[in-house]
Every structure is written in C-alpha cells, then in structure tokens.
Amino acid sequence: MQKPSLNNRKIWAIVPAAGAGSRFSKTELKQYQRIQDLTVLEHTVNRLNQLPLAGCILAISEQDDVARQLNFEKNDNIHFCLGGRERVDSVLNALIYLSDIAAPDDIVLVHDAARPCVTVECLNDLVYTVTHLATSAILAIPVRDTLKRVVQQQEIQQTVSREYLWQAQTPQASSLSQLKNAIETALKNDVVITDEASALEFMGEIVQVVQGRSDNLKITYPDDLELARLILNAQHGKTA
C-alpha cells in the first residue's frame, strides 16, 4: 500500500512501558531484555520511528531508571511521562501530556512496548487507513485456530465459531482528541478497557480493522523472547 497523505496531520506514538509484566517474570522487565544488543523497548521504538513521527511518548514508572538511559535511533523526538497503575492509566497520562504539544486532530498510535516486530508495511497500512477513511483503526489478524469454550475442570463446553473473530494487535490509532475523550468517558462509566479500541467502541465510534501479520508478536512469556529474536533475524535477512 502506498504511503499515507497526512493532510498536515502529525503522527505521534505512545508506548505504555510502566507495567511489571508478571507473566514474563516476577523480577525482570520484559521491555529491557536484550535482542541483538538492543533492548526490546529500543527495537519497538526504533521500528515506530520508521514512520515520520513528530514524537514518541514513553509512559514509564516512577522507579524506572533505565528508559532515559537508552540510545534510541531518534533520541531527539523521545518524550517521557509518568505511567499509571494500569495500561489505560499510562495511555491517558500520555494523551494528557500530548494535549499540550499536539493538535486535537493529530494521529496517535498506541503500541505495546513488547511488540518489537511490527513491520513498516503494517504501520503504513494503518496510518493510510486512518487518514483516508477518517476513522480509528487497529492492526489485527483473523483467528486461525479452532476455539473451545472451557468450563470447570478443563471440560469443553462448546466450539466457538471463528468466522467473525479477529485477534487484536497494536498499534491502535485514532485522533488525539477522540481517543482522549473516549478513554476519559469510559473510565468515568467504570468500563473495563482492555485496549484503546474498547474505549472507542463504548463511545459508538467506528474502528476499522487493518489486517496485520502473525509475526507482530507480543512478548508475554519467557520463550516469546527467543521467538522474537528469530523473527527479527528473519526480518533483517539474517540467519538465526
């Protein structure tokens, strides 16, 4: 897909990186594990910076003494803000920070800190969709495997149709004002926000699905780190 025409709208990225990631480790943060001499977070931010970003806001914890010391490819467009207790709190803090330096109609991409393998083509496809359809959008892939609903004692209750099911990924993109309003309104109404799209859905906003790729892996468990290394090697044309 061709690169998007932004019509004077700037692109900003938000990376919530304040979480503990307890499923990965009780003591080590997954975003600071190393692959090819770079941390996962550096890979992630450097990939986002393949877009013409006006800036990338990292929402980090108050105790984080690592992020500010990293050497990103475009250090001059990196901003930091304080993260929150939950992912949604970190995203909202970053949106509030952005409100002072960005236009309400600027495009905001929210991306998981532990997704270092998103391709530039997928990023361009996402921004193209947001700009040309004037809508919010997320990367996602169709569910491939047979899904089972499981009840007590690991018993299968039924097979769930996958015909209309997609697995959400990030980045998830919207305008700054629209996303900020959606998250603030959803939180006031005690809506459980699992991702940015869920807040927009609560507001009745249209969210377009842009087909991504299965190699846009989110590092969740320790063995995902090795898989991410293999993916990055393959994407860079190297042998593992």
Image (tube, rainbow, N blue to C red):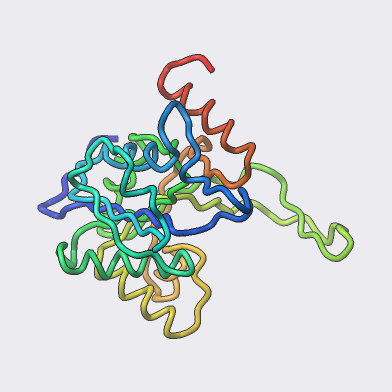
Q: Position of residue 52 (x, y in %)?
A: 19, 42
Q: Residue at x 86, y 65 (%)?
A: 152
135 and 217: which is toward the camera: 217
Where is 48 relative to 84, above or below? above
Instruction: Locate the N terminus by quadrant.
Output: top left
Q: Position of residue 194 (x, y in %)?
A: 51, 65
Q: Residue at x 65, y 51 (%)?
A: 162
The extreme bottom residue here reads 189
Where is 92 relative to 163, above or below? below
Q: Position of residue 109 (x, y in %)?
A: 32, 54
Location of residue 101 (image quadrant): bottom left
Location of residue 161 (image quadrant): bottom right
Where is 59 relative to 122, above or below? below
Location of residue 206 (image quadrant): bottom left
Q: Residue at x 89, y 61 (%)?
A: 153
Q: Is residue 140 left or right of residue 180?
A: right
Where is 73 relative to 61, above or below? above
The extreme left residue here reads 8
98 and 146: which is toward the camera: 98
Q: Residue at x 45, y 16 (%)?
A: 238
Q: Is residue 20 left or right of residue 95?
A: right
Q: Is residue 166 left or right of residue 36?
A: right
Instruction: Locate the C terminus by quadrant.
Output: top right
Q: Position of residue 111 (x, y in %)?
A: 39, 51
What count of labels does the image hold? 0
